[in-house]
Image (tube, rainbow, N blue to C red):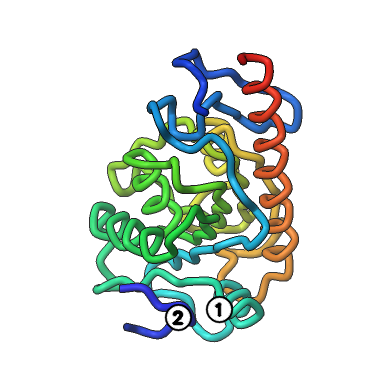
Amino acid sequence: MVAPNGKSSAHCPHSPQKVFQSDRVRTDYALSGGRPGARTTISLVDKSVVIVPGLRGSGPDHWQTRLQASHPAYRRVMQHDWLKPQLADWAAALDGAIAAAGRDVFVVAHGFGCLATLARLENRSADVLGVLLVAPRRPDEFGFEPKLLSVPAILAASRTDVWMPFSEAQALAHVLHARFVDAGDAGHIDGAWPMAERLLSKLFHLAEARERQLRVALAISN
């Protein structure tokens, strides 16, 4: 189920992917992964954001809840069972939330929600403009092996998170090709966290940079 306010309820020819190293934004010639007929431009005028809480959801003092309170149009993924970390089920719930949004989205995930987000992106990423991953759980704890992302990403981790050693979070960001942010001594980052707004704004800028680079690549290829 999906709740807007947290309540229940001309493509280019096939070409090899190119990586633009500036600003560490990975850009494909076609956002669709090269599928014929898919859209090759994005609009960031009215940004659509989907929030993905971790295990047990995000309580009233959680930064995700505060973020949504500041932006009521943001959607939150609702799980049937917040205590059961089933990747396939959680990824399916996110898939439904993205479909309900009716357009391309940014995803803001926390804890196990980060792994659900990565699992969903492995199946489909063309409708996601960027992801903010905060305090992810260890992938190997759930038998999951993350892969390189095809969308702009920021991963923020705390030096004192009991669920993910800082060095492993850095390694995960490297595997994903995500921007890494040192959140300092913030535990599992599950309370108030003003940095969320700033990082989401940065993610918007990364997506905009990706779009500009895509337009240049398309112009050169034509």
Quick check: can you spot residue 176?
yes
67 relative to 54 in the view: left or right = right
Residue 197 location in percent, x, y? 71, 65
Q: Nearer the viewer, residue 66 or 102?
A: 102
Residue 14 location in percent, x, y? 44, 16
- Figure check: 127 above or below 148: below
Query: In the image, what residue occupies the spot 56% across and 75% down?
Result: 73
Q: Nearer the viewer, residue 11 or 202?
A: 11
- Figure check: 177 above or below 8: above
**Label 1 amino acid?**
Thr
- Figure check: 124 above or below 88: above
Tell me the SS state at disc 2.
Answer: loop
Query: In the image, what residue occupies the spot 66% across and 80% down?
Result: 70
Tell me the SS state at disc 1.
Answer: helix
Query: In the image, what residue occupies the spot 50% across and 27% down?
Result: 11
Tag in front: 2 or 1:
2
Q: To which residue does mark 2 refer?
A: 6
Quarter holding the N terminus is bottom left
Q: Quadrant of residue 22?
A: top right
Find residue 65 and name its label.
1
